[in-house]
Amino acid sequence: MHITQGTFSYLPDLTDEEITAQIDYALGNSWPLSVEFTDDPHPRNTYWEMWGMPMFDLADAAGVLMEVNACREAYPNHYIRLNAYDARLGRQTIVLSFLVHRPAEEPGFRLDRQESHDRAIRYTTHAYATERPAGERYQPTDRR
């Protein structure tokens, strides 16, 4: 299953050149960037681990891409996203967020149905990856 979160989520994975173009666009709008990673991409898990500090002072896309690649190297089996912030209105607002890396194997989600009072039906999602311990959720499986 291909996780779809953020801008460009229904497109094929972006190349480094396409990521650089988006970084240039964000920097051209004076939007600082940050890199985040997680092994639990549940749609309600909005707080991912931050890789370093937000890059408020970088003006070159190469520096941002260097941080993305360092995070990819450190966490090859995690989801990694890039966020751009706009603080013009006096508050930090994410104006652009997209995945720049995903694990080779994505186990996906299950939809659980629960019947409630007055014939109401509630649905929740369950990530198959969370059945493994944190940090080992997207390790390649042995398929002998």
Image (cartoon, rainbow, N blue to C red):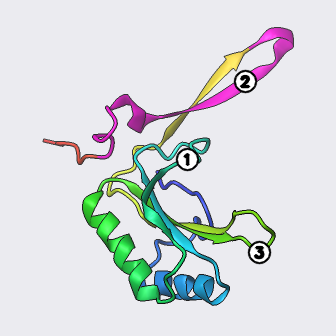
Residue 124 in the magenta stretch? The answer is yes
- Determine the residue positioned at 53% across, 82% down: 23
First reached walking from the N terminus: tag 1 or tag 2 = 1
Which quadrant, please, contains the C terminus? top left
Name the mark on residue 47: 1
Residue, far left:
144
Residue, far top:
117
Name the residue tied to disc 3.
88
Circle 3 packing at 10 Å, graded few (<14), some (14-19), many (20+), is few
Q: What's drawn in magenta, residue-wise?
A: 116-138
Q: Nearer the viewer, mark 1 or mark 2?
A: 1
First reached walking from the N terminus: tag 2 or tag 3 = 3
Question: How far across and down, in percent of the image, does residue 33 sit?
Answer: 54, 72
Give the CA distance from mark 1 to mark 2. Answer: 24 Å
Query: At numbered mark 1, what does the secondary structure look like: helix, strand or loop?
Result: loop
Q: Nearer the viewer, residue 134 or 119?
A: 134
Name the residue tied to disc 2.
122
Q: Nearer the viewer, mark 3 or mark 1?
A: 3
Query: At numbered mark 2, what does the secondary structure look like: helix, strand or loop?
Result: strand
